[in-house]
Image: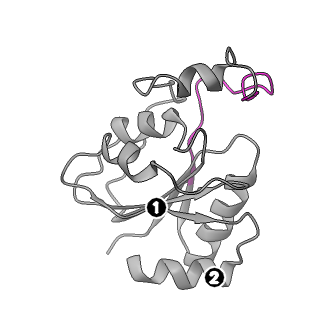
Amino acid sequence: MGRPLVAYFSCTGTTGRLAETLASAVGADLLRIEPAVPYTAADLDWHDERSRSAVEMGNPASRPAIAGTGPDLTDYTVVFLGSPIWWGVPPTIVNTFLECVDLSGKTVVPFVTSGSSPVGGTDQRLRSSCPDTVDLRPAIRFAANTSAKQLRRWSEQFL
């Protein structure tokens, strides 16, 4: 079996710190999903309906560009996929990632972070960007301070 991968998108660092903890806890490689155009504080102002994040999330077909080309995931069998929750679902850049990499035959395990939002429509939103050959598991929400021990215990079912 290949080594696991933790791929994640994070603007404020919350999901990034959790992804780093998970990768360390399970001995996984770590991949940050980088936007081609980084998000600014103004872009993330969810109170402003004209902000970049609000415009992207208002259009489910939005696919913000990622930096570089989609990575080669050939050596991985399990991909833990981390993101924050925006408007009840992962940011659309996560869909961009899913659509630009070959996940055929892989298990994708989404995890999300949020101050208070539940998983919401995460599973449906991600499923729309995965081919039928992907074993997409139900998403789970973690608190920012989830311990390595807790993450390791949860992840063992997928490894």
Q: What residue do we see at 53% from left, 62% from top?
A: 29
Q: Determine contact: label 1, label 2, CB under 8 Å.
A: no
Which residue is depicted at the point 42% across and 70% down?
Answer: 3
Nearest the eye: 110 or 85: 85
Name the kind of residue labelled 2 in the image.
Answer: Gln
Q: CA distance from mark 1 to mark 2?
A: 16 Å
Relative to 94, say whether 15 is above or below: below
Which residue is painted at 58% across and 19% down in the image? 55
Marking on residue 139: 1
- What is the three-letter code of the residue carrying label 1? Ala
In the picture, residue 105 is in which quadrant? bottom left
Secondary structure of the residue carrying numbered label 1: loop
User: Quarter holding the C terminus?
Assistant: bottom left
Q: Is residue 113 left or right of residue 128?
A: right
State the mark number for residue 100.
Answer: none
Q: Quadrant of residue 150?
A: bottom right
Q: Which residues are magenta?
A: 31-46
Of circles 1 and 2, the one toward us is 1
Q: Main secondary structure of the magenta part?
A: loop
- Is residue 90 shown above or below 27? above
